Image (spheres, grey):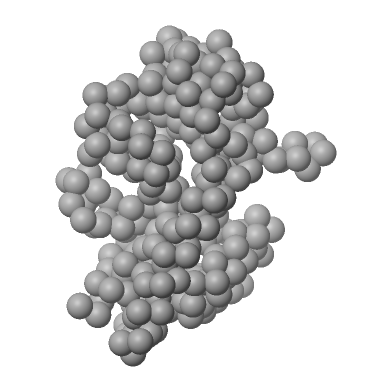
Amino acid sequence: MAVVIDGKELAKKVRGNLKIECENLKAKGIRPKFAVIMVGDDPASKIYVKSKSKACDEIGIEYEEHILDDKITQEELINLIHKLNEDKTVNGILLQSPIPKHLDIDEAFKEISYKKDVDGFNPVNVGRLLLNQDTFVSCTPYGIMKMFEEYKIDLEGKNVVIIGRSNIVGKPLMACCLNRHATVTVCHSRTKNLKEKTKNADVLVSAIGKPNFVTADMVKDGAVIIDVGINRGENKKITGDVDYENVKEKASYITPVPGGVGPMTVAMLMNNVIKATINQNK
């Protein structure tokens, strides 16, 4: 029976430590400030933005929101990013995805100053991560690495299998695990014999957004299971990518959904905002 990795409790601990750091900065006259840009009114994005605002309130980070019309041009979006880059009172900038199809999100990420890119999507920060240099790591992989650290799960020499190769989770997590001396296999929709790969995993991460996709017969006895998937069922019930009830009988550690990776993503974003503030005020 697996040990349940409690992301909610760990995130609370991280936020508590950040609150102390934030108070220390304010005592020195430094006020951390975080700006979020949201284009349009995607319902899921609204929920995510609200959770970020709530976390800022709890820690003591000043929060600024820019909600843009979904008809805006690329130029208008870039102009706002440049304005926030130049604003010395703003320490961290986040562009909430998705954005409308007519806008180029990669170009927008590239324009956010790498010093304020608390989401870790600027190519400079992505490159630094691959080179194992100090950088902003995108928040979901960063949260997963924090979980490994907290639960003393050592990756050195382990076989880590990641299902999903997105720029948000799969690719940066691959780099994080390589930097911890793991042997990493990244699987995706074109992977042949997926089960063969997953059964060999000491650590299995699923980030594909398919409910109950990872079944017990795909998992090695004693594997560590990290479920990044958030899927809404017909009854509005949230489930992960992993068949939790059956897989937990075989795994050594497992993250639940909800209450696993999700809360850690927001906590590590806040961590990046404080880090950015410290870097900019050295």
Q: Which residue is drawn at 55% across and 34% down?
A: 4
- The quadrant in which residue 167 appears is top left
- The quadrant in which residue 163 appears is top left
Q: Residue at x 69, y 58 (%)?
A: 43
- The quadrant in which residue 121 appears is bottom left
Q: Residue at x 75, y 40 (%)?
A: 237
Q: In this view, does 95 lie above or below 145?
A: below
Q: In this view, does 195 lie above or below 228?
A: above
Q: Where is residue 238 in the image (x, y as percent from the top left)?
A: 70, 40
Q: Where is residue 143 in the image (x, y as percent from the top left)?
A: 43, 48
Would residue 197 be found to the left or right of residue 228 on screen? left
Question: Can the viewer see residue 194 in this picture?
Answer: no
Q: Nearer the viewer, residue 25 or 241?
A: 25
Q: Residue at x 64, y 19 (%)?
A: 246
Question: Can the viewer see residue 10 in this picture?
Answer: yes
Q: In this view, does 236 lie above or below 154?
A: below
Quick one: quadrant of the N terminus? Answer: top right
Q: Nearer the viewer, residue 102 or 32?
A: 32
